[in-house]
Image (cartoon, rainbow, N blue to C red):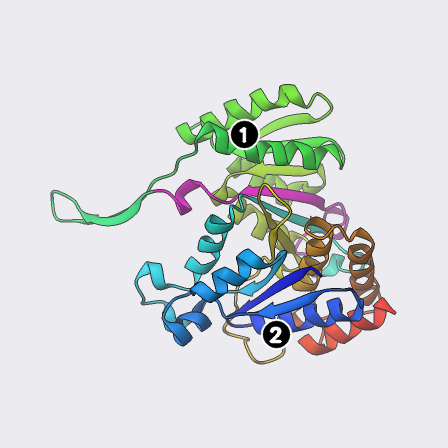
Amino acid sequence: MPLIAILPGDGIGPEVTTQARRVLDALDLDLSFEEAAVGGAAYLESGHPLPPATLDLAKRADAILFGAVGDPRCDALERQFRPEQAILGLRKELGLFANLRPAKLFPGLEDASALRPEVAGAIDMVIVRELNGDVYFGEKGMRTTADGRREGYDIMSYAEDEVARIAKVGFETARVRQGKLCSVDKANVLETSQLWRDVVTEMSAHYPDVALTHMYVDNAAMQLVRNPGQFDVIVTGNLFGDILSDQASMCAGSIGMLPSASLGAGRKGLYEPIHGSAPDIAGQGKANPCATILSAAMLLRYSLGMDNAADRIEAAVTEALAGGARTADLGGTLSTEAMGDAVVKALG
């Protein structure tokens, strides 16, 4: 029986993971679940954002459903104890280097996008973001310059094998979609990006059926607003992927609608909504659970091979939205639980 680890985390994390668990239960699949604390909740409970028991569960599980981390009460902690270190630690310990973030405008949500309906309606892409390199994992620190000024630094770097393995994910993702891959970098000013572009170009020789283009990140940000329908699959580094995927979510209506999958070399993955912990609305029943519910669908598809069950969840979310179900971020009035009710009802 597959084991799913549920790590609710902070803020709205427990609220949205509860609804995703309800949807999984409604499918009546042969699954088992274990829950553990992570992030700020874990620090306040045990003194570390990723306690040994939580990491052990993550390693034992076949897949992980993750909520969100971030707690203002922990903002002043030393960096290694901050809630966000939990997700970075899980990525590193589990070897999760590829983040897949689909962005698609669901029918009926055209008015929720900041873009014109005819522009927003064309959005259907996947952003493949590298997770284990770049400035997030490079050498970093604070120092004092010779003339007494404080200076912060974060080193951006990628080795060619790190670029090659994420490029492979990008090419193979594009191969089963529309066959178009756009590699996003900043090669005109960054040596790291020049290596990125060189390696991705070299990899393209192995994928003659995929049309490869390159785009600087500033232009990519502009094109996501101007003509998002041009993109099929985007592959990019950790920092640029973090920014562009959040931008894509708002083009598609709401950050509360976008799921993600963090994958490694095997089938195990970590699945989470791309939104944060939203402490300003935590505990108020206002959060949109759809991104987490759709993350559960990705979990079934990528880690457990249950494509039919994943299709059912995605169809249920589509049906609920088409029927007018909306949380506040989509201009509606439904609570988190009521939105979960709508999706469960649509499952039949």
Cα–Cα span, label 2 and label 1? 38 Å
Residue range (magenta): 113-138
Q: Residue at 71% of width from left, 61% of height from top?
A: 1
Looking at the rendered structure, the secondary structure element under dot 1 is: helix
Q: Quadrant of residue 298?
A: bottom right
| Residue 182: quarter of image | top right
Query: Can you identify the residue that label 1 sits on?
Result: 164
What's the amino acid at mark 1?
Ala
Residue at 12%, 42% (x, y): give it: 146
Q: Name which residue lies at 11% across and 44% down.
A: 147
Image coordinates of residue 257 in percent, x first then y, are: 67, 60
In this view, which residue lies farthest toward the bottom? 284
What percent of the width, then of the height, locates residue 16?
Answer: 63, 70
Residue 15: numbered disc: 2
Residue 284 in the image: x percent, y percent?
Answer: 59, 80
| Structural crowding at the residue carrying mark 2, measured as other residues with C-alpha within 10 Å and reported as few (<14), some (14–19) or many (≥20) | many
Residue 217, relative to residue 278: is it above or below?
Answer: above
Please tell me whether residue 160 is drawn above or below residue 97 in the rendered image: above
